[in-house]
Amino acid sequence: MRVAVNGRAMEAHQAATVHDLLRRMTAAGLDVSLTPTLASWFREGNWPVLQDRDPAAQGIDLCIGLGGDGTLLDTVGWVGRSDVPVLGINLGRLGFLANVRLEEVDQALAALGQRRYTLQERSMVEVIGQEAALGPANFALNEVSVHKRDTSSMIAVHVHLGTTYLNTYWADGLIIATPTGSTAYSLSCGGPVLHPTSDALVITPISAHNLNVRPFVVPDRFTVELQVEARADKCLLNLDTRSVSIDGDSRLSIRKAPFTLKMVELEGQDFLHTLRKSSTGAWTCARG
């Protein structure tokens, strides 16, 4: 199995842990290479670098993210539309996406080598109407949000479901979350938890100034149309871990993407198992 390993720049003391993980992957029979981001961190630290590889061009079978949920979201962005499955190994606390802990790595690698896993398709969303700002990276696994900049005044977001008017939100911002993203930013703003295979989106205001608005779950067959009105010249458009500046009077459409993310699901590592483990501690906000 040809595996690409992705990660962010980390503290120097973590290099030994990463080297050990790569050694264990190779010992498990995986053909391992590094993504450019992780390879760059290795070079900066003068550590030996494995080959870096593009998933679509080289036929990668799997991409592993080393880190937390933020790293896993970066990995999703790197994989893009290539249909390469992803798996997250958590180097810190429990995550909803990167849910393989260090003490579980050997069992997970053995399962990968023996093909003892399933692929769960996770729906994604894409943004239409901001091509100049986003380019081809117009998709997100967790959520799309619009947000006021810095300390500027709140913004108004007029929302339509298709051609039908829904509401105007006076708030610091607005989140359109997928079922996967329901345990992330949306949750921290009071949104509900959805099972990741649900056919739905969650519309969640951020610090709303309307006393009567609440998070709203809608079928994902709807295109969510946003008209943003900000007093400032610019506001922020966020897609998972990526953020761009857009005009304060922008229009954009958010819809279910025509492709999915294939998440590796190991034995005993399904969403409900992760949810039960998290219930004994703090929820993880899978953003960065």
Image: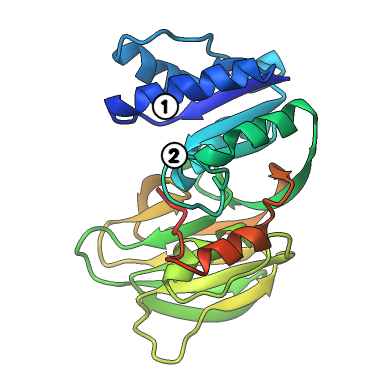
Q: Amino acid at mark 2?
A: Leu
Is residue 188 visible in this depiction of the protein? yes
Q: Residue furthest bottom?
A: 212
Total labels drawn? 2
- Which residue does the numbered mark 1 point to in the structure image? 17
The quadrant in which residue 8 appears is: top left
Q: Give whichever of 105, 213 is nearer the camera.
A: 105
Residue 29 tag number: none
Instruction: Give the Cα separation between the discs numbered 1 and 2.
Output: 9 Å
Q: Is residue 120 above or below residue 183?
A: above
Instruction: Using a 10 Å C-alpha cutoff, classify the residue at mark 1 as few (fewer than 14 neighbours), some (14 to 19) or many (20 or more).
Output: few
* Dot 1 or dot 2, earlier in sequence: 1
Give the percent coordinates (x, y) of residue 213.
47, 86
Q: Give whichever of 264, 26 is nearer the camera.
A: 26
Q: Is residue 22 above or below residue 98?
A: above
113 horizontally vs 12: left or right: right
Q: Residue furthest left?
A: 151
Residue 91 tag number: 2
Give the percent coordinates (x, y) of residue 146.
42, 60
Secondary structure under the numbered disc 2 in the rendered image: loop
Color style of the picture: rainbow
User: Which residue is at a point 19% across and 64% down the rendered structure image?
Assistant: 151
Is residue 137 visible in this depiction of the protein? no
Pointer 1 with pointer 2, Cβ within 8 A: yes
User: Which residue is at a point 45% across and 45% down the rendered structure image?
Assistant: 70
Q: Is residue 141 above or below residue 87?
A: below
Give the percent coordinates (x, y) of residue 36.
47, 19
Q: Give whichever of 186, 125 is nearer the camera.
A: 186
Secondary structure under the numbered disc 1 in the rendered image: helix
32 horizontally vs 248: left or right: right
Give the percent coordinates (x, y) of residue 91.
44, 39
